[in-house]
Image: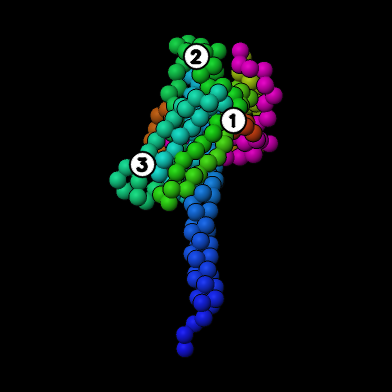
Amino acid sequence: MKMKFSSIVIFTSLVILAALTVITIVAEARSQKKKFEISKIYFEFNSSGNDLGVHVFLDGEDWKELTITNPKGLEIFEVEGGGAYKKLGMTELFFEGAEPTLDDVPLEKLLAMFPKGKYKFSGKTVEDQTIAGTGTLSYAIPAGPEVSSEIANNSLVIRWEPVTEPPEGFPDEKIEVVAYQVIVGSFQVTVPATTLSVTVSPEYVASLPPGEHEFEVLAIEKSGNQSITEGSFVKE
């Protein structure tokens, strides 16, 4: 039985409409922006070494290209995967900028190189989708905590004073420390801001050879900025 002309026109129109719908869905899927789950940029101040650097950490699914632009519109970082990384993509990325001493690079000059505000993270996924995020760089940089340590009952006790102010000479920003982190060799723990001491187990202390050992206490501000104070203890 032959189809009537009108039926053929309707059938053809439906096929074309379906094809256009599929093309539109695919185009929209490709144009949709994905977001980095994490996009952070923050200062790290080492009060013992009097040095200051900027760190970046991000996490997102299967990206192959990335650029970071500062609040003034200047591109400050660019990376592109090649070979297998271009085909499969990448997820996490962490890097530290150089940490010059403030004697070599004055604080005012270093801060001018990294203006506070929103930094744009923009890239492409392996499927050529745009992936983006923002990170806010703050000048709320905490002072390094004052630390002390002792070995008592074969355990190592590390203590510190609460940090409520910026380092001397830094921008007078309100400081709100949300956590402290203690690092002794491979031992590492992060505790709430209400905690001002950590006890390292006698088993870990016993595993250390006799002599002097270093530790670090970090104060972490709510902006993500952090400060480090280095200390040491002697195991007999």
Residue depth check, mark 1 versus mark 2: number of the one nearer the observer: 1
- Mark number, residue 81: 3
Observer-nearest residue: 146 or 219? 219
Tags 1 and 2 touching, CB below 8 Å: no
Write down the residue under mark 1: 118
Q: Up-down: is 6 above or below 138?
A: below
Q: Residue furthest front?
A: 5
Give the SS element for disc 2.
Answer: loop
Observer-nearest residue: 10 or 6? 6
Give the SS element for disc 1.
Answer: strand
Mark 3 and mark 2: Cα distance apart in space: 34 Å
N-term-proximal mark, 3 vs 2: 3
Residue 22, image x, y percentages: 50, 62
Residue at image location 60% in from the left, 27% down from the top? 117
Write down the residue under mark 2: 102
Question: What are the residue bounds of the magenta stretch?
Answer: 169-194
Q: Residue furthest bottom?
A: 1
Residue depth check, mark 3 versus mark 2: number of the one nearer the observer: 3
Q: Amino acid at mark 2?
A: Leu
